[in-house]
Amino acid sequence: MTTAMIECRGLTHTYRRGESEVTPLRDLDLDIAEGAYVALMGPSGSGKTTLLNLIAGIDTPTAGTLRVNGQDIAGMSRSDLARWRRHALGYVFQLYNLVPVLTAYENVELPLLLHPLGRADRHRKVALALELVGLADRHDHYPRQLSGGQEQRVAIARAIVTDPTIIVADEPTGDLDREAGNAILDLLDQLHTELGKTLVMVTHDQTAAERAGELVRIDKGKIIRATPAPEAGEAGSGP
């Protein structure tokens, strides 16, 4: 029996925008199995990124429950939540979010500075992460010296350097051309199949969604369909 890594029940998130309340996610139920690769799709404003940020502990549910690996992350204190994120979760952003004045090595090292590790241990972990993403020879380059695809690889190395169990990715290929995007998708495939990471990816790209094992479509804050993702070449007959 497959274990649910992420369990959402009645999940709702509301925030204020001026005088109005906005509810991008409403009464959502979803299970994501341990070791799954899930693509979240839907129109802009449908609640995809909100769901990703709730899973990542960046936002807090207004109502409902969210358990990750058996832990109620919505009920954690801020310090406990920060500690949980450092160990359990890696976030890959669409626009990389690299620090421009730091080298690739230093950007990847940043999350480890919050851990009680010596310099030698940090160096070993950073070197391994950069090797996994194919950038060991670019460790001393600054973001401005890298291509978009290489910057995203550094961002992925930063997300995996702490060896998290879950990786969430928000449009990881959205700012890349097709060739660079496919290389990033190949890397995410490797993290899932070879390292066994649970992977949740927001995407507008059907080609990217076809890489996942499950496709969840969201509209107006609710799941409208959750199915196995189509096999490559079947995008036109989608679910």
Image: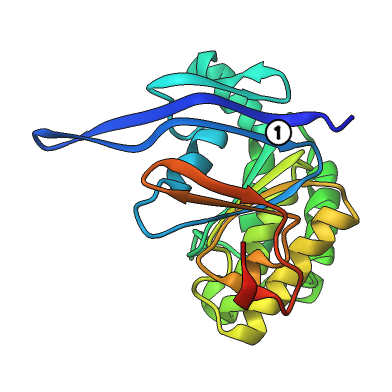
Color encoding of the figure: rainbow
Q: Is the residue marked by circle 1 packed among few (<14), some (14-19), or many (20+) residues within 10 Å?
A: some
At label 1, the amino acid type is Ala
Residue under the point 8% across and 33% down? 19
| Coordinates of residue 192 in the picture (x, y in percent) | 81, 54
Residue lying farthest to the left in this orientation = 19
Number of numbered tags placed on the structure image:
1
Quarter of the view holding residue 180: bottom right
Who is closer to the viewer here, 225 or 163? 225
- In-image side of 137 versus 40 (left or right): right
| Coordinates of residue 15 in the picture (x, y in percent) | 27, 32
- In-image side of 147 versus 27 (left or right): right
Who is closer to the viewer here, 102 or 224? 224
Who is closer to the viewer here, 74 or 226? 226
Element under disc 1: helix
| Coordinates of residue 143 in the picture (x, y in percent) | 55, 72
Q: Quadrant of the C terminus?
A: bottom right
Residue under the point 61% across and 77% down? 236
Whether residue 106 can be seen here? no
Residue under the point 76% across and 37% down? 33
Q: Is 33 drawn above or below residue 65 in the view shown?
A: below
| Coordinates of residue 1 in the picture (x, y in percent) | 89, 29
Q: Is 200 drawn above or below residue 81 in the view shown?
A: below
Q: Which residue is mark 1?
A: 88
Whether residue 237 can be seen here? yes
Who is closer to the viewer here, 87 or 223? 223
Q: Is 63 drawn above or below residue 197 in the view shown?
A: above
Q: Is 182 drawn above or below residue 212 in the view shown?
A: below
